[in-house]
Amino acid sequence: MLLRVLSPGDAGFAALFDRSTTFSAEVERAVHAIVEDVRARGDAAVREYTERFDRRAPTERAGGATYEIDADAWRARAQVSDEVRRALELAAERVRWFHEHQREADLDVVRGGIRLGLRVLPLERVGLYVPGGTARYPSSVLMTAIPAKVAGVAEVIMVTPGASAETLAAAQIAGVDRVFEIGGAQAVAALAYGTETVPRVDKIVGPGNQWVAAAKRRVFGQVDIDSVAGPSEVLIIADETAKPAWIAADLIAQAEHDVEARPILVTTVASLPAAVERALEEQLVTLPRRDIARASLELYGAAVVVRTIDEAIDVANRYAPEHLELDVADPHPLVPRLRTSGAIFVGTWAAEAAGDYVAGANHVLPTGGAARYASPLGVYDFQRRTSIVEYDEAAARADADVIAALAAVEGLDGHGRSALIRKQRGGAS
């Protein structure tokens, strides 16, 4: 059986919710050493690790050795078919359109002589990590670079351990400013601390393996990060109207990402798991990544049979999935009751794969249960807010005693004096 069939009362049910993003002690130690070495030695350390792990030497130029892809090489390498370019441009237009609606205005309010405001400003420079080598993820370039540019980020730096033509084309379309062909923990460290050739950024976003994720966690605080991402996951709520072949296809779409991916079905129909199982076996035969998908389904796939849709909703809210599909007859009344999902796909026609590529919503989503408190990547992730506080004389005098009283409670008399001196006539002298 590819899918374990469970009910909420079964002993193995609780194990579905254990999706830790911790890493082995060996990975943590190795990543710590790499990050600190890059911090200390800059480009020399980046070159050493890149030559060791990726077998890639920097390009020698008049100004010295660099892993940056210059403009001419970028254009020459970003050659894709017309079909792929049209698809990337359509996806980019949809992503840009949706994210333009996320822009926030400054806030400015006045109350009794006190003016308060929030000034919304873009980050100055952002780093994008894009997996490379045998992997090609141009969609991730669009999903990370476009919101940054919509937010007004002045410079977007992309790092990747092996840029495909599709990735470079996506970077052009999305407005990426510079590309460095480096990856792993050394790339994250270079972005976080800066080197002689790689500029320091304010935030690092984008997916990566456990080395990349551990490095992002390590440098958090030095820079901001989007998240420490775990394996991709989908939870599908299905009733008697669901098509087993379509459910199987959506579970496979998630499972083919990685052997660690979590494909979960929750259904009110006791016979549905067996029908989905048959469809899975039929579809895996012709899938190029069938070994990866099969391993994911066998290791982490599950079909949870519940008695009612209410119970299915409870399971979904507890699981807090990255992707949640509603493959039921009347999905819209369920949406307000689902409180902890990264993205909800409403109705049988809304395939999760559409969200990955072309719908326009961001596909960088919280995993591992983080949807309980985290959000999809958006324009707001590339902005910071500055508080503005202004008092007139009357308001400053009126608040002085209150400030002093609260300061006294906390044993910070200097705070109280700084307010009271403004109340006293002649205090400015």
Image (cartoon, helix red, strand yellow):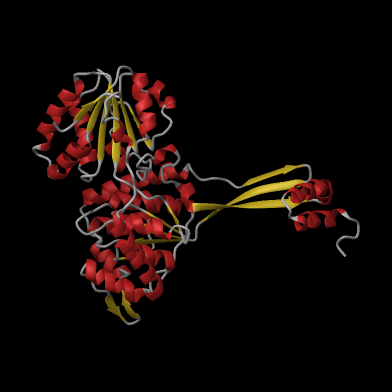
Nearer to us in this view, 231 or 105: 231
Q: What residue do we see at 29% from left, 39% from top?
A: 233
Q: What residue do we see at 51% from left, 52% from top?
A: 383
User: Please, which residue is most extreme toward the right here?
Assistant: 425
Can residue 395 be seen from the camera position used here? Answer: no
Whether residue 69 sits left or right of residue 2 in the image: it is right
Position in image of residue 413 (x %, y %) = 77, 56
Whether residue 16 sits left or right of residue 191 in the image: it is left
Question: Does 302 appear above or below 158?
Answer: above
Can residue 57 be seen from the camera position used here? Answer: yes
Q: What residue do we see at 20% from left, 53% from top?
A: 81
Q: Quadrant of residue 285?
A: top left
> In what quadrant of the picture does the N terminus appear?
top left
Nearer to us in this view, 177 or 3: 3
Q: What residue do we see at 49% from left, 61% from top?
A: 124
User: Please, which residue is most extreme toward the bottom here?
Assistant: 62
Q: Quadrant of residue 3?
A: top left
> In what quadrant of the picture does the C terminus appear?
bottom right
Question: Does 254 appear above or below 211?
Answer: above
Position in image of residue 313 (x %, y %) = 37, 24
Q: Quadrant of residue 62?
A: bottom left
User: Please, which residue is most extreme toward the left here?
Assistant: 285
Position in image of residue 382 (x %, y %) = 47, 52
